[in-house]
Image: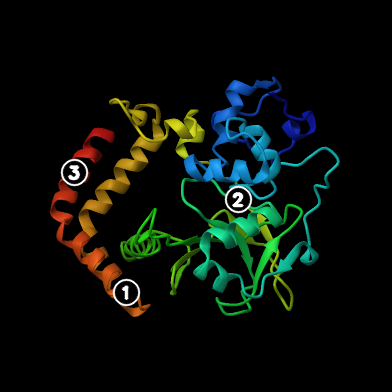
Amino acid sequence: MVLPMMEAYLKSSSAVPLSLLLPLSARRYTGYEAMPFFEGLLPEDDVREAVARQFHVSAMRPMELIRVLGKDCAGDVVILEEGDSCDLPGEAAYVPLPNTLEEIVCYPYGAIAQLRAEYRLSLAGGQEKIALFHDDRAPLDKGWFAPLAGAPSSHIIKPQIADRFPLLASNEFICMEAARAMGFEVPETAIVLGEHPLFIVRRYDREMMEGSGDGALQVLRRVHQEDFCQAIGLNSGEKYEKHKTHHAQDMRQPKRVAAKILEELASSLEAAFEAAAIESARVGLADDAHDLTQRIVRSTAKRKGVMRKAADLLG
């Protein structure tokens, strides 16, 4: 595999690099150089294995998987086959899914697998999830659509599956609410209760285009982004540090950002999780989720010390 950049794009005033690892250049990047970025768009570990089996593709061949699943990636990236249209899809590119939330709440694995198979939808990360489009004119339990032909999704839905990640939905909701209470800019989130509660988050890498949504489905534009592993050239298997590796040493400017975030977290952690506990009770989370919040609050003294040490090391 080689990755050339079109000359017309390189000359454009609006050209942006695909990755910090792949700056704008007339030279062709090798597959070895480009692989961390593209591999970082895919699911990880067990989820990747399941997706590969579903589409009869080897999990060891990420570019084959990305060809299957690349119509709605993280950031401003769409992977197209030769001959596919690059035009921005309109309303016809969304298929209504009238009962999809209820189906995911009751049968998370089966419902997500079916959506993924039928509409070729997937996301990066190690947890089961699906990306869909929500019509903001409708309440949260209605107005869901599957994007087609490269149309952008608007929300990510994560089910709480007890056998793998107990309290995942509750934990993510609580942490997002704690970040909101601390003054961080975080996307809209919600919890849908049921047999397998759902954590729903509005995508921060999608924005509504001006003038859209007036009497019709809103039109979204993609906002480019990448994670730290893509930016410093690490594959997903290297994401979690082992054997005393220190990925933070490769991060330079992100190190200073991380240090600032850690210091702010340490300063207001207890109050933030107290606020998150109140919010989790308001939305009706079960007692075990509220107990989880309280355990986090009680352990913040130790966490603050660790965070401040980490901030000193990164700063």
Q: Position of residue 82 (x, y in %)?
A: 83, 37
Q: Position of residue 139 (x, y in %)?
A: 57, 80
Q: CA distance from mark 3 to mark 1?
A: 30 Å
Which residue type carries mark 2? Ser
Q: CA distance from mark 2 to mark 1?
A: 29 Å
Q: Residue at x 78, y 58 (%)?
A: 89
Quadrant in the picture for the C terminus? top left
Which residue is under mark 1? 286
Query: Do the numbered discs 2 and 3 sit on residues whose CB atoms are within 8 Å?
Result: no
Q: Residue at x 57, y 49 (%)?
A: 123
Where, by quadrant of the figure, is residue 182 drawn? bottom left
User: Is label 1 in a helix, a strand or a loop?
Assistant: loop
Query: Do the numbered discs 3 and 1 sit on residues whose CB atoms are within 8 Å?
Result: no
Which residue type carries mark 1? Ala
Which residue type carries mark 3? Val
Front residue of 119/213: it is 119
Q: CA distance from mark 2 to mark 3?
A: 35 Å
Which residue is under mark 3? 306
Quadrant in the picture for the N terminus? top right
Where, by quadrant of the figure, is residue 270 drawn? bottom left
